[in-house]
Amino acid sequence: MTLLSLFAAAINRYNERRRRAQALDELRALSPAQLRDIGVRLDGNRVLSIHDTAEADINTRSDSVPAAREDSR
């Protein structure tokens, strides 16, 4: 990597962190009811999707169900 590409990568990381911090601040300004309406839950500095956690529950439950047998043809 050249010095210029290292500098550009550092600027990109800085801009990405600023963008994420601004988005988190905007989400914190919303009420819990508004967050539920858009399917988001805040957990400290993390943003959790209600849909992702529901999908994880479904996947966990389906793991306990035996797999269907393959046809032996």
Image (cartoon, grey):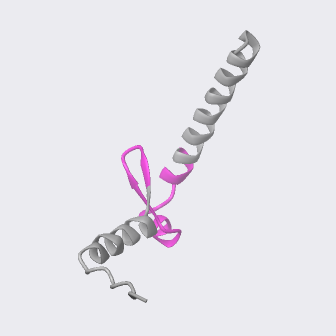
Front one among 35 and 8: 8
Give the magenta range: 25-47
Position of residue 57 relative to residue 40, above or below, is below
Magenta-drawn stretch contains 12: no
Q: Quadrant of residue 5?
A: top right
Q: Quadrant of residue 50?
A: bottom left
Q: Residue at x 55, y 39 (%)?
A: 21
Left or right: residue 33 compared with residue 13: left
Q: Position of residue 43 (x, y in %)?
A: 36, 51
Left or right: residue 40 compared with residue 2: left
Q: Quadrant of the N terminus?
A: top right
Front one among 34 and 73: 73
Q: Position of residue 25 (x, y in %)?
A: 53, 45
Q: Residue at x 38, y 71 (%)?
A: 54
Left or right: residue 54 compared with residue 38: left
Magenta-drawn stretch contains 40: yes
Q: Quadrant of the C terminus?
A: bottom left
Q: Residue furthest right?
A: 4
Q: Residue furthest left?
A: 64
Left or right: residue 66 compared with residue 45: left
Position of residue 38 relative to residue 46, above or below, is below
Q: How many marks?
A: 0
Q: Position of residue 66 (x, y in %)?
A: 26, 80
Q: Residue at x 37, y 66 (%)?
A: 53
Position of residue 64 relative to residue 71, above or below, is above
Front one among 64 and 45: 64
